[in-house]
Image (spheres, rainbow, N blue to C red):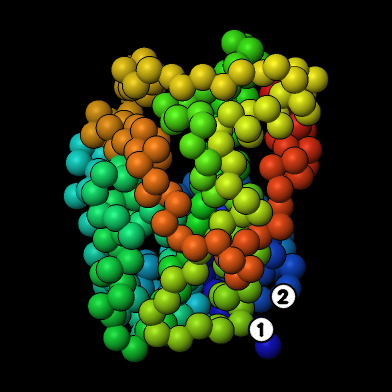
């Protein structure tokens, strides 16, 4: 049966993939994004497009009204002077819109590591959002705790090409679960269409296995005919200055860096891996299907 589904962050790495899946299945999909230029293809597939910001409670409430389900996220604000304050405001807006609209099913994009409320950078806000959404009555909420996105490696293609190495602030030898956003989107789309969850629940989406950054970099190296491609843990201050130079606020950068440097503490390895939390796309699959085509176009 066709459902009415609202997608926030429709131009994002997960939201954009969810919308394609649901539109191809024939659902009535409403997409909300600040920059709607990227959504023309979805419009041709039959999506209703709303240009709007997550701060607009009236718009959100109207979009959620009469919908069967919605996919919500806590978007980054690289200019926020106080990241946690900004995150709290967004969560408050979402809650107000959910209450005001009476929407019965919410799939909340969370993250592995959101069981902690400090020491995990940006994810302190996603953890708090989970808790606040759990206080709602008369609405079913599923928190998708996703592993580290394999797609984040696409951001360092320039570094690999120009400098001949891959690097972030994270420790290179601590294995963590990593997942393709296509797998996350498939799971989210399934729940949004099937409405197969009740009450408040958490589902971890952990990819096929745990990888270290060095191991993943080695898989990239093999694919680009550079088998000795090294991974380097970059100095925090150097990375911070680069982000600040790109106009990011200091508080946002501190949160972003804390998320990477804290990986070694093990907070990303809290969720249990089992058949229900394991997804199929391997690092090798991702590199050949997604990374390589982009690498060669870059």
Residue at 45% x, 86% y is 198
Residue 181 at x, y percent in the picture: 61, 52
- State whether residue 124 appears in this view: yes
Q: Which residue is mark 2?
A: 26
Distance, label 1 to label 2, CA atoms, is 7 Å
Residue at 46% x, 60% y is 271
Residue 269 at x, y percent in the picture: 45, 52
Residue at 66% x, 83% y is 2
Residue 121 at x, y percent in the picture: 30, 43
Q: Is residue 50 above or below residue 256?
A: below
State the SS at label 2: loop
Q: Is residue 134 left or right of residue 158?
A: left
State the SS at label 1: loop
Give the number of marks.
2
Q: Is residue 83 left or right of residue 32?
A: left
Q: In which quadrant will I find the C terminus?
A: top right
Q: Is residue 73 above or below residue 201?
A: above
Q: Residues within 10 Å of mark 2 (few under 14, many from 20)?
A: some
Q: Is residue 15 left or right of residue 82?
A: right
- State whether residue 111 appears in this view: no
Q: In which quadrant will I find the N terminus?
A: bottom right
| Sequence-first disc among 1 and 2 | 1
Q: Residues within 10 Å of mark 1 (few under 14, many from 20)?
A: few
Residue at 67% x, 18% y is 229
**Labelled pair 1, 2 in contact (Cβ < 8 Å):** yes
Please tell me in which quadrant of the rendered image residue 185 appears: bottom right
Residue 251 at x, y percent in the picture: 23, 34
Q: Is residue 126 above or below residue 188?
A: above
Residue 145 numbered mark, or none? none
Compare residues 101 and 81 and report the one nearer the observer: 81
Please tell me in which quadrant of the rendered image residue 24 appears: bottom right
Q: Which residue is mark 1?
A: 2
């Amino acid at each position: 049966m066709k459902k009415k589904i609202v997608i926030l962050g429709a131009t994002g790495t997960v939201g954009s993939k969810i919308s394609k899946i649901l539109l191809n299945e024939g659902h009535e999909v409403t997409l909300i994004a600040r920059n709607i230029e990227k959504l023309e293809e979805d419009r041709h597939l039959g999506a209703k497009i709303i240009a709007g910001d997550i701060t607009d409670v009236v718009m959100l409430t109207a979009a959620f009204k009469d919908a069967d389900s919605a996919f919500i996220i806590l978007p980054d604000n690289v200019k926020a002077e106080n990241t946690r304050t900004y995150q709290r405001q967004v969560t408050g807006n979402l809650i107000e819109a959910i209450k005001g609209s009476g929407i019965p099913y919410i799939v909340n994009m969370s993250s592995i590591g959101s069981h902690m409320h400090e020491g995990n950078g940006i994810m302190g806000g996603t953890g708090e959002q989970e808790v606040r959404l759990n206080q709602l009555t008369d609405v079913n909420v599923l928190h998708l705790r996703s592993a580290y996105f394999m797609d984040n490696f696409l951001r360092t293609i320039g570094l690999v090409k120009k400098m001949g190495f891959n690097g972030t602030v994270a420790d290179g030898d601590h294995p963590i679960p990593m997942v393709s956003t296509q797998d996350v989107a498939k799971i989210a789309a399934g729940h949004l269409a099937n409405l197969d969850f009740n009450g408040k629940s958490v589902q971890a989406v952990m990819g096929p296995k745990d990888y270290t950054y060095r191991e993943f970099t080695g898989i990239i190296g093999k694919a680009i005919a550079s088998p000795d491609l090294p991974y380097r843990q970059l100095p925090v201050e150097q990375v911070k200055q680069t982000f600040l130079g790109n106009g990011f606020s200091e508080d946002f950068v501190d949160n972003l860096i804390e998320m990477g440097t804290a990986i070694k503490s093990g907070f990303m390895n809290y969720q249990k891996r089992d058949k229900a939390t394991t997804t199929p796309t391997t690092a090798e699959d991702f590199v050949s299907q997604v990374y390589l085509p982009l690498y060669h176009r870059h």
